[in-house]
Amino acid sequence: MEHGLVIIEDRKDPNNKFGNHQKVPIPVECLEIIERQPKFEGEDRIFPYKAKSIAVRFSYWTKELGFPDIRFHSFRHEGVSRLFEQNMSIPEVALRSGHKTWEHLRRYTHLLHKEPPDLWGQCKRIENNYWAENELVNRQLLKASMSLSWGTE
């Protein structure tokens, strides 16, 4: 983390299931999010949750909040598209996304803009407005969600 890198252990690969760890550069904005995550004693992972637990809770909350068509994988597609919009080269994007061939990356290149929008700034404004308008409701939701099991490993 001190060097702006994170290690993804056992990165998904159809031919190599184990031992294919990869160091990936992390943007400053992401490092800020990582810093805000709660720390668990004896746990060095940023998000120490089971993938299935995350997928189930994500589906539940997107439906509850009125966004039933959003899938967790949609964020991966969106993120890779934005890397191309920032004029990153194919190898730079592949390093971050884990794709090994141009064929796999090609599907993400359909949203090219000359000037990428400030998506981080937009998200922060939306988040701040939302929290300001829903502070009491969100505290109640947070308290309720903390009582649910996230399935820590």
Image (cartoon, helix red, strand yellow):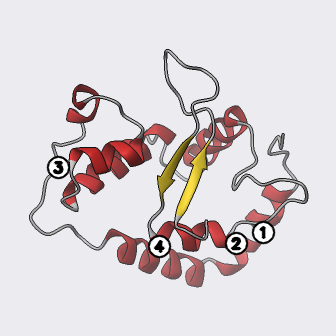
**Mark 1 or 4 closer to N-term?**
4
Which residue is tagged 1? 140
Q: Residue at x 78, y 69 (%)?
A: 140
Nearest to viewer (mark 1 / mark 3): 3
Q: Which residue is mark 3?
A: 111
For the residues bearing labels 2 and 1, Cβ distance under 8 angstroms:
yes
Residue 43 picture location, percent across and down: 83, 53
Q: Residue at x 58, y 84 (%)?
A: 132
Helix, strand or loop under label 2: helix
Task: Provide residue 49's location: percent of width, then percent of height.
Answer: 75, 44
User: Which of the marked residues, 3 or 2, is nearer the chain's N terminus?
Assistant: 3
Mark 1 in CB contact with mark 3 (< 8 angstroms): no
Mark on residue 28? 4
Which of marks 4 and 2 precedes in the sequence? 4
Q: Which mark is residue 126?
A: none
Residue mark closest to the camera, 1 vs 4 = 4
Quarter of the image for residue 33 reads bottom right
Which disc is residue 137 wearing? 2
Separation of disc 1 and disc 4 at Cα?
31 Å
Of the residues shown, which amino acid type is indicated by label 1?
A: Gln
Residues 26 and 59: in front is 26
